[in-house]
Image (cartoon, rainbow, N blue to C red):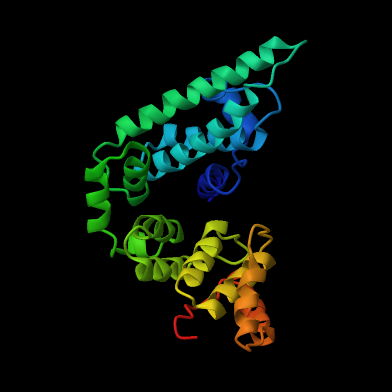
Amino acid sequence: MLLRASILLSLLALTGCEEPLTLAQVCKDTPGLCNDLNKDSHCKEQRADVIMARYHEYKEPTDENKYALLKGFEKYEQCVSLAAKIEHIKLKEKTTSRVEGHLTSIKEITRIFQDTKNTNHPGLLYYHWSRNNDQSALTKLLTIEDQPSVTEDAEMQFFLATYYIKFDEEKTIDLLYKTLELNKPDQIPNPEIYTTLVSLFNKHEKFKHAYTFAKIAQLSGITNIDIMSIEHQLTASGKSVNSLDSLAEQTFESIQTGQFVSPRDF
C-alpha cells in the first residue's frame, strides 16, 4: 500500500506539479539560445518570443515549430535591425549586441529555409514562395489549398488572398471573408483585410459594401480609410448610411466574438 502511494506521488510530481517554463529558466539551462541576441531592453517582447520558439524547436524540430520560429525571427529582425541603427554614446556594447542579434536573425532564418526545402507545411510553403520566389513551393501550396490545414486556418486564407488578388478578385473576397469567419474571439484581424475589401468593393462600385467595411475598419481603429468619398457616392444617389452604420456595428461585433458569417448576399 505504501509502495503504491509512493509511486502515485512520484507520478504526480512528474506531471501535474512541474513549474511552468520561464524565459529565465530557458536562458539558464540553454544559454546558447539567448546569448547571441541583443542584451538591452529593446525588442523585449520579440526577443522573448524568439527565445521560447527556439527552445521548442530545439526540443522538437518539427515543421510547425520551425514555422513558429521563422515568424518569430522575422518580427525580431525587423525590430532589432532598426534598434541597431541607434547609436549609444556611452554604452557602445548595446549597439554591438543589437548588431549581433540582427546577424543571428539572418543566420537562423537562412538555416530554417535550408532545413525546410522539402516541406509540405502550408505556412512554410507560402514563406518559401513569398520570400524566396520559390515557384515549386507555390505549386505545392496550390495543390493543397482545399485541405483542412489550409481552409481552416485564418492565416493561410489571408495568405492565399494576397496571391489571388492579382487575377481573381472574387475569389480574393471569398478568402478574406473566410479569414474573418475563422477569426477567434477577441483576436484582432490583419488590418489589410479591411482595407483590401474596401478597395475592391470601391473599385467595383459596390459602395454599400465598401462603406460598411470602411466603417468596420474605423471601429477597429484603422485611420487611413477614406470613408467620406464613399459616403458621398451613396448620399449623392439618395441613399442613407444609417442602416449601414448599424450593419457595420453588428458585423464588427460578430467578428470580435468569433461569430462572423460571410455576407456575400447582403
**Rendering coords of residue 235 (x, y %):** 65, 83
Give the residue displayed 26% in from the left and 36% down from the top.
117
Seen from the viewer's position, the closer of residues 64 and 41 is 41
Measuring from the top left, give residue 103's x and y in whole percent: 49, 20
Q: Nearer the viewer, residue 204 or 168?
A: 204
Q: Is residue 36 visible?
A: no
Q: Residue furthest front?
A: 236
Residue 65 located left or right of residue 11: left
How far from the left and from the top, in percent, is residue 41?
71, 27
Q: From the viewer's perspective, is residue 184 above or below residue 123? A: below
| Residue 253 versus residue 172 in the image, above or below | below
Can residue 245 be seen here? Answer: yes
- Does residue 229 sit above or below 70 in this rendering? below
Residue 34 placement (x, y as % from top left)? 56, 24
The answer to which image quadrant residue 37 occupies is top right
| Residue at 63% in and 83% down | 236
The answer to whether 243 is drawn above or below residue 257 in the figure is below
Residue drawn at x 64%, y 26% as measured from the top left? 83
Q: Residue furthest right?
A: 90
Total marks in image:
0
The residue positioned 37% from the left and 67% from the top of the image is 169
- Whether residue 35 sits left or right of residue 168 in the image: it is right
Quarter of the figure with residue 229: bottom right
Residue situated in front as seen by the camera: 166 or 130: 166
Left or right: residue 178 versus residue 225 is left
Front residue of 213 and 206: 206
